[in-house]
Image (spheres, rainbow, N blue to C red):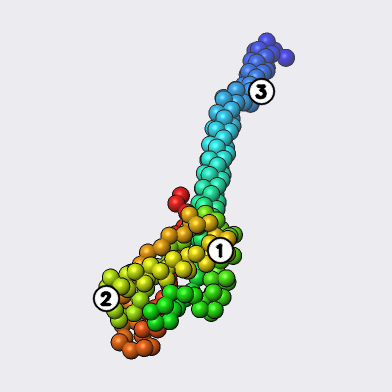
Amino acid sequence: MTGCAKKATLQEGAVVTQEQKAVAQAPAEAAATTAPDTRAARDRALQDQALIDQAARDAAEKAAREAAAKAAKDAADRAKREAKEKAAAILKELQIADVNFDYDKYNLKPEAQEILKKGAPAYLKYRDYKLVVEGHCDERGTAEYNLALGEKRATEAAKYLTDLGIEKERIKTISYGKEMPLDQGHDEAAWAKNRRAHFVIFPPVK
């Protein structure tokens, strides 16, 4: 091999070696360039997932708060409804039907006594309720006379109730005489309805 040929061969070998180095270095350089991008992408993905997870937790907590608030409101509404229903049931149990009197009389007839006997036990059960007994008359007679007669009728009914065990201080009486007729008629059928004692319930003051 001549000197020129040998020199050319060496130069070619040198070129190959440099090319090989370049080829070998390229992946490393590419990897070095790609690594930061990969980490950044991974970090962004983690951040995005963290935001998604936080949003899910916030939504779950909000839903739990709303559910708890609704449950509390439903419970309060149910308690109010039950209390109202209970109060209505008690008032119904305490209601005493009117008792009627003969003309110009204030003594209790047997049927009136039975009505009071039937009504008294509820007042022994619910002792925080009070009662007003109203005395009424028909339209015949003077206003003054009927006021006095109405008071006697109310007092007689109240006394009978106290004899059945209801405390005297829980019962009050009032007379309306002929001023508040139940029936506006002007015959015996109407008058018989108007000669009465009427019972008004007073619930406890809260």
| Mark 1 and mark 2 residues within 8 Å of each other at the beta carbon | no
Q: Which mark is residue 142?
A: 2
At label 1, the amino acid type is Asp
Q: Earlier in the sequence, mark 3 or mark 1?
A: 3
Q: Which residue position holds label 3?
A: 24
Q: Residues within 10 Å of mark 2 (few under 14, many from 20)?
A: few
Residue at (42%, 77%) from the top-left corner?
105
On the image, the x and y values in percent for residue 46 come to 58, 33
At label 3, the amino acid type is Ala
Is residue 161 among what the camera can see? yes
> On the picture, is 183 further left or further right than 57?
left
Q: Quadrant of the N terminus?
A: top right
**Badge 3 element:** helix
Q: Which mark is residue 25?
A: none
> On the picture, is 24 further left or further right than 169?
right
The quadrant where residue 29 appears: top right
On the image, the x and y values in percent for residue 203 come to 47, 57
On the image, the x and y values in percent for residue 158 come to 48, 65
**Badge 1 element:** helix
Name above or below for residue 40 compared with residue 137. Answer: above
Q: Marks 1 and 2, Cα distance to the nearest angstrom?
A: 32 Å
Q: Which residue position holds label 1?
A: 163
Is residue 34 among what the camera can see? no
The mark lying in front, picked from 3 and 2, is 2
Q: Residues within 10 Å of mark 3 (few under 14, many from 20)?
A: few
Name above or below for residue 151 compared with residue 41. Answer: below
Q: Marks 3 and 2, Cα distance to the nearest angstrom?
A: 131 Å
**Badge 2 element:** loop
